[in-house]
Amino acid sequence: MDLAYIPSPSTGVIHLGPIPLRGYAFCIIIGVFVAVWYGNKRWIARGGTAGTVADIAVWAVPFGLVGGRLYHVITDYQLYFSEGENWVDAFKIWEGGLGIWGAIALGAVGAWIGCRRRGIPLPAYADAIAPGIALAQAIGRWGNWFNQELYGRPTDLPWALRITEGANREAGTYHPTFLYESLWCVGVALLVVWADRRFKLGHGRAFALYVAAYCAGRGWIEYMRVDEAHHVLGLRLNVWTAIVVFLLAVVYIVVSSRLRPGREEIVEPKAEKKAEEKPEGSEAAGESGEDAESGEDADVKADVSSGDAVDLGKDGKDSKNVEHGAGKS
């Protein structure tokens, strides 16, 4: 008998009247908000304007969701198009099934479109949102916990995940691979933030570091999973994908560091233009005001010292005459 384990929720959906509230969807939505919020903070710190990250996310997020679903359906087509299966289920995204590889790939296309519309370099935007994407993945993985899916091999460890019997699963305790990946993604986010501050990563290298670090963890976590998947040369397809993408990310970091070292000085031309115009206007106004005030003071002092009459009254009437060397009591 297992004395300690992580329980699974009895259901992944709560009905609010006729409206179903699904845990998987909530995890995805919360993850997106966290990514945009944190990405916005990093973008502003790099010299961009508030709201730019959200504007581009309007393009990136839908593209990413479509890409993630397409990757899952294509690589696991037997779940939807084999004999006895209903192809309509391929559209039921709320039941789980988003491939991070497709989400990042097609999401990058959406981000590129948004960046083009704003005149922003895509690599700079990718660097700003990289840690936020890792945090979004960390949160999104808990959607698998609600759906009781994508767990690992059987285990009796104290942190084993308790799975209840279902249509395509057997009751028992298994490795909580969703938890392993969630914690790994948090570590990836911290790594990228640290490395970015330490080495001033730019031109897409912070994003490439996120990709490489995530793939390094995804490889061994994927190897532990027991859900149905295609195998190539004895390894799951996603393991090979992690290896290939990891190598590409590392090559990009090395080549980019040699070709374009350092970080972009300007990430958002419009923000830089506004920053240049504002100080010039305020400084000009301040200087003219100081000059005018100092000029008036100089004139008064000159009149007083020379013995000329100084008008201190109102409506053009003299209220007092000041003469050099004499006063009137």
Image (cartoon, helix red, strand yellow):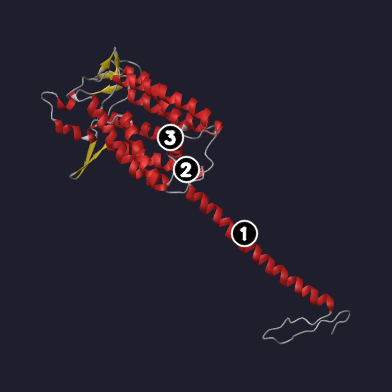
* Between 64 and 143, the one nearer to me in the picture: 64
Q: Is residue 264 left or right of residue 63?
A: right
* Between 247 and 20, the one nearer to me in the picture: 247
Percent position (x, y) of residue 287? 66, 62
Percent position (x, y) of residue 107? 34, 36
Percent position (x, y) of residue 63? 30, 39
- On screen, 247 above or below 126? above
Residue type (three-letter) at the residue carrying disc 3: Ala
- Residue at the farthest top position: 234
Say whether disc 3 or disc 2 marks the residue closer to the N-terminus: 2
Q: Which residue is mark 1?
A: 283
Q: Which residue is mark 3?
A: 130
Residue type (three-letter) at the residue carrying disc 1: Glu
- On screen, 73 above or below 288? above
Say whether disc 2 or disc 1 marks the residue closer to the N-terminus: 2
Contact between labelled residues 1 and 2, with CB atoms less than 8 Å apart: no
Q: CA distance from mark 2 to mark 1?
A: 27 Å
Residue at position x 38%, y 24% from top? 245
Residue 280 visible somewhere in the drawing: yes
Q: Quadrant of the C terminus?
A: bottom right
| Residue 297, quarter of picture | bottom right
Residue at position x 33%, y 43% from top? 59
Q: Which mark is residue 43?
A: 2
Percent position (x, y) of residue 78? 18, 23
Q: CA distance from mark 3 to mark 1?
A: 37 Å
Q: Secondary structure at mark 2?
A: helix
Say whether disc 3 or disc 1 marks the residue closer to the N-terminus: 3
Residue at position x 75%, y 85% from top? 319
Q: CA distance from mark 3 to mark 2?
A: 11 Å
Q: Secondary structure at mark 1?
A: helix
